[in-house]
Image: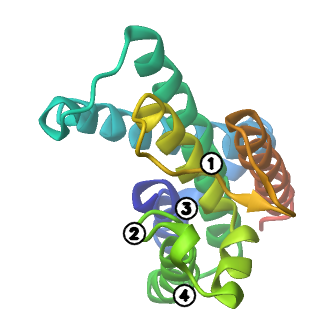
Amino acid sequence: LFTSIMAGVSVVWDREFGFLKEVLVAPISRTSVAIGKALGGATIATIQGIFMLVFIPFAHVSLTVGEAFLLIALMFVFSLSLTSMGLFIASRIKSMEAFQVVVQMVLFPLFFLSPAMFPTQFLPAWLGTAVKFNPVSYGIDSLRQVVLGSQESAVFGIELFGYRMPIILDIAVVALFGIIMGTLAIRSFRVQE
């Protein structure tokens, strides 16, 4: 989560030191630059997530090889969505300090208004509603469904209108969010000066 969104810091850094101007006048499309930055940031975040998979046996959770590959694919889609969001934010901000402030103002509510720290079924109704509008909730819920899917006592799934979301709908929400953020990031890169 944090690595993905902070991938945009390289854009701000490059802008401050003049390197972004050189990249943007290169004989490649700005769309390619945005996609490359997004894929690079998502790859780094996914690799960091893979390193965390080493600790799953210590939590007394077992994964099949198929579940591990599904988890890696989900991490990549989730990371790509958040990296695109970070790039969109970074493409609009001129200084490192402003980027860090804006990212923290966006990142912490997204993190704390998700099921990452607290189970959603115990939240007050007004807070539960905020969680349902948070795209990070669906990414975390999909990862949780893969990791804890075989646990009988595990409770997961975002509930909308009395219907508990299956993993495929969680993935669809994350993918849609990623497409929207990716489109916004690409458009922002196209109008860069």
Provide the secondary structure element on which disc 1 rests. Answer: helix
Q: Residues within 10 Å of mark 2 (few under 14, many from 20)?
A: few
- Labels 1 and 2 touching (C-beta < 8 A): no
Question: Is 162 in front, or is 68?
Answer: 162
Q: Is 106 left, or right, of 111 in this rendering?
A: right
Q: Earlier in the sequence, mark 3 or mark 1?
A: 3
Residue 117 is tagged as: 2
Label 3 vs label 4, nearer the camera: 4
Provide the secondary structure element on which disc 3 rests. Answer: helix
Give the residue type that dot 1 points to.
Answer: Val
Q: Position of residue 92 (x, y in %)?
A: 71, 76
Label 2 vs label 3, nearer the camera: 2
Q: For residue 136, which quarter of the picture?
A: bottom right
Real-space CA distance between mark 3 and mark 4, rounded to the nearest whole angstrom? 19 Å
Task: Give the residue pinned by disc 1.
Answer: 23
Q: Position of residue 150 (x, y in %)?
A: 43, 28
Q: Position of residue 75 (x, y in %)?
A: 50, 37
Residue 105 is tagged as: 4
Real-space CA distance between mark 4 and mark 1, rounded to the nearest whole angstrom? 29 Å
Instruction: Reply above or below: 7 against 154.
Output: below
Q: Is 69 left, or right, of 86 in this rendering?
A: left
Q: Residue at x 83, y 59 (%)?
A: 184
Residue 11 is tagged as: 3
